[in-house]
C-alpha cells in the first residue's frame, strides 16, 4: 500500500472519529470508516495497468492461505594466508515453519510457527521477506546462525559440529519487469493475480550478498590444531535476466526466471590466526538469483502450489573466494472468498 493511500486512510479515520464521536454513534462510525477504507482499497486493487487478456484479478475480497516453508544456507570459502591454503565448506540446519495468512484486497498479514524452535531444537534466527508487484519485486533475507556444520581444511581436515562456528548473512535481490502488462510475478508467488495466457518478460535487477563467519572458542578448546578462522565479505551486482509464465489448460501455471548479475564491487577478507588476506575489489564474478513456481487452480476459489527462491554466487579470486547459496522453498494451499 502506498504512503499516500495510508495517509488518506488515516485522515479519513481521524476526521470520522472526531465527527462521529460527538454524536456517540459508534456503530455508524465503524460502518462509515470501513466503507470509505474499502472503497479506497477496492479502487487501488482493481486499478488496471495490465492487459486483462493476459492478467486479471481473482474474484473475491479475501484470500486465506496455509503454507509450509523450508529454508537452507551453505557457505564455501577458500583463501591463502602466509602461503597456507585454507578451505571451509559449511551449511546451516534447515528451518521448517508453518504459516497461516490472510489477505484483503492485496493487504496481507500472516503468522508463522517453527515446531523445532518451540521444542528447543532450533536456535538460529532468520527473516525472509518477499514482495511481488506488477513492475518491481524483491527478495530479502537475513540469517544469524550457530548451527553450522561441515569441514575446515587447514593442514589437514577438521570436522565442524553445531556450535563450533557462527554465521551472519544478508541477501537482497530486486527485479524490474519490463512486460508487466502481460507477465505477472504475483500470479506465481502471491496468487493476487491470475495469469490467463503464457507470457514472458525481460528483467533488470540489483543484487547484494554479504555476511560473516567465525569459528568459536569451543572449537579451539576441543581441537587446538584447528585454526581460528574469520571471514567477512560483501558483493554488489547489477544485471538482467528473463522470466516466463507458462499457462496450461487455464488451471496450471509454471514459472521460471533467472537474474544473473555482474559483480561491480566486492570486499572479501579472510583472517587465519590473526593474519589477513583480502580479495581484489573488482573481479569478473557473478551473482545469481533464480525463481521457480507451480500453481494449480482447482476452481476459482481453491488453489495449491509450490515456490522456490534461490540466491547464489560464483567467484574466482587468487586470494580469497567466498560463495554463498541461500534457498527458500514453500508449499501452500489457499482459498479465495
Image (tube, rainbow, N blue to C red):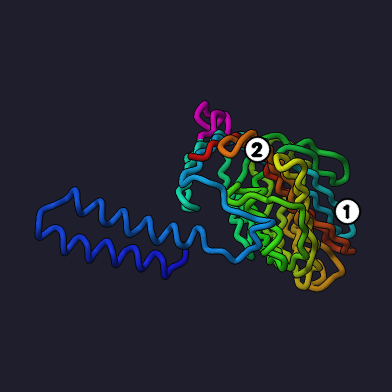
Residue for badge 2: 297
Q: Camera-side residue: 18 or 182?
A: 182
111 over 49 or under it: above or below = above
Q: Which residues are magenta?
A: 113-123
Going 76% across and 59% down the picture, which residue do you hit? 270
Going 50% across and 36% down the picture, which residue do you hit? 100
- Cβ atoms at labels 1 and 2 below 8 Å apart: no
Left or right of 21, for residue 264: right
Find the distance from the CA under tag 1 to the CA under tag 2.
Answer: 53 Å
306 over 209 or under it: above or below = above
Q: Is residue 74 visible?
A: no
Q: Is residue 195 magenta?
A: no
| Residue 85: assigned label | 1
Percent x, y of residue 169: 65, 53
Closer to the chain start, of discs 1 and 2, is 1
Q: Residue furthest left?
A: 23
Amino acid at each position: 500500500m502506498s504512503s499516500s493511500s495510508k495517509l488518506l486512510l488515516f485522515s479519513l479515520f481521524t476526521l470520522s472519529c472526531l465527527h462521529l464521536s460527538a454524536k456517540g454513534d459508534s456503530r455508524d462510525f465503524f460502518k462509515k470508516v470501513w466503507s470509505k477504507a474499502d472503497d479506497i482499497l477496492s479502487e487501488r486493487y482493481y486499478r488496471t495497468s495490465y492487459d486483462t487478456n493476459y492478467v486479471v484479478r481473482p474474484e473475491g475480497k479475501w484470500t486465506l492461505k496455509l503454507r509450509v516453508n523450508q529454508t537452507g544456507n551453505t557457505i564455501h570459502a577458500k583463501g591463502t594466508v602466509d602461503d597456507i591454503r585454507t578451505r571451509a565448506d559449511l551449511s546451516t540446519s534447515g528451518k521448517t515453519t508453518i504459516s497461516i495468512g490472510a489477505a484483503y484486497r492485496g493487504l496481507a498479514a500472516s503468522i508463522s510457527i517453527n515446531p523445532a524452535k518451540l521444542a528447543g531444537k532450533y536456535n538460529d534466527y532468520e527473516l525472509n521477506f518477499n514482495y511481488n508487484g506488477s513492475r518491481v519485486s524483491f527478495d530479502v533475507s537475513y540469517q544469524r546462525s550457530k548451527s553450522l556444520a561441515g569441514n575446515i581444511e587447514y593442514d589437514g581436515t577438521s570436522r565442524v559440529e553445531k556450535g563450533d562456528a557462527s554465521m551472519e548473512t544478508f541477501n537482497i535481490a530486486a527485479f524490474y519487469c519490463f512486460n508487466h502488462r502481460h507477465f505477472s510475478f504475483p500470479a506465481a508467488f502471491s496468487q493476487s493475480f491470475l495469469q490467463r495466457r503464457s507470457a514472458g518478460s525481460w528483467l533488470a535487477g540489483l543484487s547484494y550478498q554479504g555476511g560473516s563467519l567465525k569459528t568459536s572458542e569451543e572449537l579451539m578448546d576441543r581441537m587446538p590444531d584447528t585454526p581460528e578462522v574469520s571471514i567477512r565479505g560483501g558483493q554488489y551486482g547489477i544485471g538482467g535476466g528473463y522470466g516466463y509464465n507458462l499457462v496450461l489448460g487455464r488451471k496450471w501455471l509454471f514459472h521460471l526466471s533467472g537474474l544473473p548479475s555482474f559483480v561491480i564491487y566486492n570486499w572479501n577478507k579472510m583472517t587465519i590466526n590473526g593474519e589477513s588476506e583480502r580479495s581484489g575489489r573488482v573481479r569478473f564474478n557473478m551473482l545469481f538469483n533464480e525463481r521457480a513456481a507451480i500453481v494449480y487452480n482447482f476452481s476459482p476459489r481453491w488453489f495449491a502450489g509450490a515456490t522456490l527462491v534461490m540466491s547464489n554466487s560464483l567467484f574466482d579470486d587468487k586470494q580469497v573466494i567466498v560463495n554463498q547459496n541461500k534457498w527458500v522453498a514453500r508449499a501452500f494451499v489457499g482459498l479465495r472468498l
